[in-house]
Amino acid sequence: MEKLSIVVPCYNEEDVIDIFYDKLIEITAKISDKYDYEIVFIDDGSSDKTFSKMKSLREKNSKIKIISFSRNFGKEAGIYAGLGSSVGDLVVVMDADLQHPPELILDMIKYIEEGYDTVATRRINRKGEPIFSSFCASMFYKLINKFMEIKLEEGAQDFRMMKRNVVDAILSLDEYNRFSKGIFSWVGFKCKYIEVENVKRAAGKTKWSFGSLWKYAMEGITSFTTAPLKIATIIGILVFVISTIFAFTIIIQTLILGKDVPGYASTIVSVLFMGAIQLLCVGILSEYISKMYMEIKDRPKYIIKEKRN
Ligand code: UDP
Ligand code: MG
């Protein structure tokens, strides 16, 4: 019998974890003739009762594994830890808030049996989300797909089933700055996307703010493309050409036409312009340097406080 591992990163999910578990068990019962299962809960440093709820679920069901982090390390770290301790032939990663309907696991298994290596969901709309965030998100995908050699599927969610070899490939990318969407796409394999409607959280609150979305977007860009660095170089060359032409015109004007009254406007504009361009390029550079800095330190991606196997 094959084994299905269900990896669930949880951060302050005390309101939903029990409902989620009940739903999940209904689904695993439906496939029990063919698949054994294990549930890997990652408690990402929750400050509420998430961990104790996990422990009481485990007392009922020994197929539950728990990894509890010493503090909040972020969902990506949670996914990495969960994948690392999963042993199934098939592994599915999903959120605890029921935005990833457990019944889709059945469809995913069907596609895997048809020969796909990985199956993920893609939402076809962003209903119920702030318009501004949706707009920014869609701009982000357009931009990033233009510059990256890998393609990020717009609307692709972190609800994903993978065969063992895909999981091993993902684990072999052990970078500190983990941008899962990019990593999933980078490793390749034959992937099937199931189109789904956007589902609202069952309970609790989302942990995303505009600031964290911005950080996420930056992470995506700097992890998978160096295009911004090239753009900085191109801007530099352009500005150099323009200012050379400008300098020559001024010299010629002064020497031949004897025009020596300095222009306040042109001086201040070029000083400000040059300053802005330089700060922009330094900013781009520092994005990459800060990422390199964190990678070079080679710190662990998470620290485990407690574990139940
Ligand atoms: N999550 C996590 N660590 C975090 C933030 C979120 O493990 O620092 C988990 C969270 O418990 C949930 C999943 O990641 O199971 C998705 O989080 P959320 O619902 O807040 O994000 P959204 O669905 O809005 O993208
Ligand atoms: Mg959610």
Image (cartoon, grey):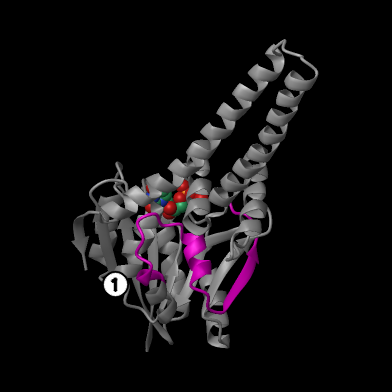
Considering the numbered disc 1 on the image, is that residue within a helix, a strand or a loop? Answer: loop
Residue drawn where x is 56% and y is 27% of the image: 275
From what the image shows, is residue 201 above or below residue 250? below
Q: Residue furthest bottom?
A: 1
Query: Residue 231 appears at what percent x and percent y?
Result: 60, 48
Q: Is residue 221 above or below residue 204?
A: below
Residue at (52, 76) in percent of width and height: 118
Q: Is residue 151 magenta?
A: no
Question: Residue visible at 39% across and 49% down?
Answer: 291
Q: Residue furthest right?
A: 257
Q: Nearer the viewer, residue 272 or 167?
A: 272
> In the figure, 39 relative to 249: above or below?
below
- Say which quadrant the N terminus sits in: bottom left
Quarter of the image holding residue 77? Answer: bottom left
Location of residue 197 (image quadrant): bottom right
Q: Residues within 10 Å of mark 1 (few under 14, many from 20)?
A: some
Kindly tell me whether residue 78 is visible in this rendering: yes
Taking the magenta stretch, the answer to whether it contains residue 190 is: yes
Asked whether the viewer can see residue 17, the reply is no
The one of 27 and 66 positioned closer to us in this rendering: 66
Residue 19 % position (x, y): 43, 56
Residue 149 falls left or right of residue 14: right
What range of the chain is rendered magenta? 170-199
Give me the residue at 46% from left, 62% from top: 94
Amino acid type for the residue under numbered disc 1: Lys
Read off the residue under disc 1: 63
Which quarter of the rendered picture does the C terminus lie within? bottom left
Choose between 81 and 280: the one closer to the eye.
Answer: 280
Residue 171 occupies which quadrant of the picture?
bottom left
> At which x and y percent is residue 116?
56, 82
Q: Residue furthest top?
A: 261
Number of dots carrying numbers: 1
